[in-house]
Amino acid sequence: MSGSYDATCTFCRVVAGEVDAPIVYEDTDTIGFLDHRPVFKGHVLVVPRDHVVTLPDLPAERLGSYFAVVQHVARLLPEALGAQGTFVAENNVVSQSVPHLHVHVVPRTKGDGLRGFFWPRTKYAAGEAAAYADRIRAALAT
């Protein structure tokens, strides 16, 4: 990709290391990090390193490799956290809190209370995000 960067974009700033976020996955084109306001603890955001606003803006030649990372995270997140499955979602413009393409991979357990598209948010206790990131990072490294 071209290496585009938008200094006003929070996710571009995470990619550049200007904003601290617990990173759980990275390669040359893609990065995964914990959402700072997770639906459930261990909620990962998978983003392209380059500034791409919506899924339709992602070059077609990047779709396969980008979603291979999303699939990798979705496959291993339950094992890393003792969850039963995942919820995978992506918004374009409407409900897109940061205008940078990102796919949510949320750990799920039957009876966890998530209903439809109502996404209650939680917070990490001090040091807790790092522990979740370590567990996910270890699983994704396999």
Image: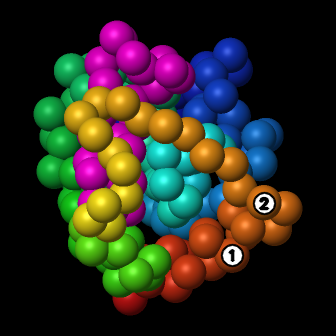
Q: Residue at x 18, y 42 (%)?
A: 63
Instruction: Identify which residue is drawn at 55% across, 40% down.
Output: 121
Residue at the spot x=28%, y=40% of the render? 115
Q: Position of residue 85 (x, y in %)?
A: 25, 67
* Pair 1/2: label in front: 2
* Range of residues picked out in magenta: 86-108
In the rendered image of this protein, does residue 139 appear above or below residue 122? Answer: below
Q: Position of residue 2 (x, y in %)?
A: 43, 32
Image quarter in which the N terminus is found: top left
**Figure quadrant of residue 133:** bottom right
Residue reaching furthest top? 94
> Looking at numbered disc 2 in the image, what kind of residue is underneath it?
Ala
Residue occupied by mark 1: 131
**Can you say whether 23 is above or below 48 in the image?**
below
Q: Position of residue 84 (x, y in %)?
A: 27, 74
Where disc 1 sits, the SS reads helix
Q: How far separated are the C-alphas under marks 1 and 2?
A: 10 Å
**Amino acid carrying mark 1 in the image:** Ala
Mark 1 vs 2: CB contact within 8 A:
no
Mark linked to residue 1: none
Horizontal relation, residue 23 to residue 94: left or right: right
Left or right of residue 4: residue 67: left
- In the picture of the structure, the residue carrying the numbered disc 2 is 125
